[in-house]
Image: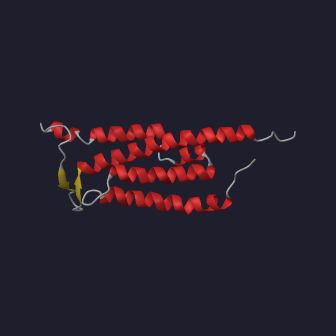
Amino acid sequence: MNRRLVILEAAAGPLYGLILAASVWVLLRGHNEPGGGFIGGLVAASASILWAVAHGSEAAAKRLPSGSPVTLAAVGVGLAALSGLPALVVGDAFLTHWWGTLPLVGVKVSTVLVFDLGVYLCVWGALAGYALALLAIDDDELAADEPEAPR
């Protein structure tokens, strides 16, 4: 039995990009208003889950920035941890964040954004990995139920 949903497969492409764009907007909005890395990561995970429902868990895992949800989550944890190191260099407490302006371009930046990006990647990787593993069980069961093709 093939459960292929052509409409969902067709809609998944544009929706995937739109959902990821919305997740980045939520990530960046979180500095001044509700949002941030955690909620942005939840939204990004929903994009991966949509892709998995439409195209399978393996295809969804390949679309992750690292190709693996575990790697994505690990990079996120590492990035969040690294955001606290600049404070240690100058003798402040770990995760005391810095704010400043990039020379020449005048863009305001902070280590808070690096921390939020780490949380975003960690939540996306962890939740997508969990959901994709659950959906893969269903994929395996469906494959086992299908009759073999004649040779």
Q: Residue at x 83, y 41 (%)?
A: 149
- Left or right placement of residue 109 versus residue 8 in this view: left
Identify the coloring: secondary structure
Q: Residue at x 53, y 61 (%)?
A: 15
The outermost residue toward the right is: 151
- Left or right placement of residue 97 versus residue 74 in this view: left
Residue 41: x %, y % from top left: 40, 50
- Left or right placement of residue 95 versus residue 80 in this view: left
* Image quarter hosting the C terminus: top right
Residue 52: x %, y % from top left: 57, 49
Residue 142: x %, y % from top left: 69, 42
Looking at the image, residue 33 lies above or below residue 141: below
Residue 111: x %, y % from top left: 24, 48
Residue 144, can we see it? yes
Q: Residue at x 45, y 43 (%)?
A: 127
Q: Quadrant of residue 132?
A: top right
Residue 67, can we see it? no
Looking at the image, residue 143 lies above or below residue 63: above
Q: How many marks?
A: 0
Q: Residue at x 40, y 44 (%)?
A: 123
Looking at the image, residue 120 lies above or below residue 68: below
Along the viewing direction, whichever of 130 and 29 lies nearer the viewer: 130
